Amino acid sequence: MTTLPDGFVAYLMARDAERADAITEFLGRLTDRERTLMRDAAVMGYVQGRRHPDDEEHPKDSAVLQLVIDAALDLPDLYPATAAVSEQTTTTRLEYFLQTRQDDGTWGESSSYETDPEWIVERLKRRRAQHPGSEHRVAWRTTTVTTGPVPRIVPAATTPAPAAG
């Protein structure tokens, strides 16, 4: 057996710690619902991979996705967040607004939100004419709202579980 140099081992351990921190940070940015859907898909993907015969070619990503979703939907008690998606409604709204550069260089919101891009461009022209010494721009945001029954989810370690109802 070959012994690895101490510096290389220290590097590998530091990289492992960095990856673990990145994963923790990533999961912390997800909502409980997103985290649970990801968990459902990851676990079922792992299960499907373990069940795949060694002597067969591995299917393409799209086929794997279909296998994972089909298996998760077939076991709604084990994958409730995935099962609840069929009862959810999601709407997305794209809105435009004006921003004005602040004295510290950051951009601050300086108008209400509008869905008509032509209207906001006209508003930008008027704003520039009214305040020629300031810098203005059009910005946008997307608001996505998902409604449906509260599924049994796996909350983050620091997030309390949602109330059943």
Image (cartoon, rainbow, N blue to C red):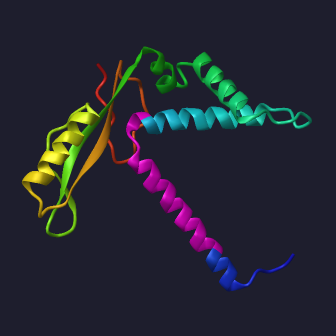
Indicate whether residue 13 is drawn in magenta: yes
For image coordinates 60% across by 23% down, the residue present is 72
75 versus 131 height, above or below: above
Above or below: residue 10 compared with residue 44: below
State how many labels appear: 0
43 falls in the magenta region: no
Q: Position of residue 43 (x, y in %)?
A: 61, 36
Q: Mostly what secondary structure, the magenta segment?
A: helix
In this view of the protein, which residue sits in the foreground, 133 or 31? 133
Residue at 86%, 32% in the rendered image: 53
- Give the image location of residue 59, x and y in percent: 79, 33
Say whether residue 16 is left or right of residue 119: right
Q: Quadrant of the C terminus?
A: top left
Residue at the spot x=45%, y=20% of the render? 84
Q: Quadrant of the N terminus?
A: bottom right
User: Where residue 70 appears, x then y in whole percent?
Assistant: 64, 20
The residue closer to the viewer here, 105 or 163, is 105
Compared across the picture, whether 37 is left or right of 139 comes to: right
Expressed as whole percent of the image width and height from the top left, the position of residue 30 reads 41, 43
In the displayed image of the protein, which residue is found farthest to the right?
Answer: 55
Relative side of 111 to 49, left or right = left
The residue at 65%/73% (across/down) is 12
The span picked out in magenta is 12-33
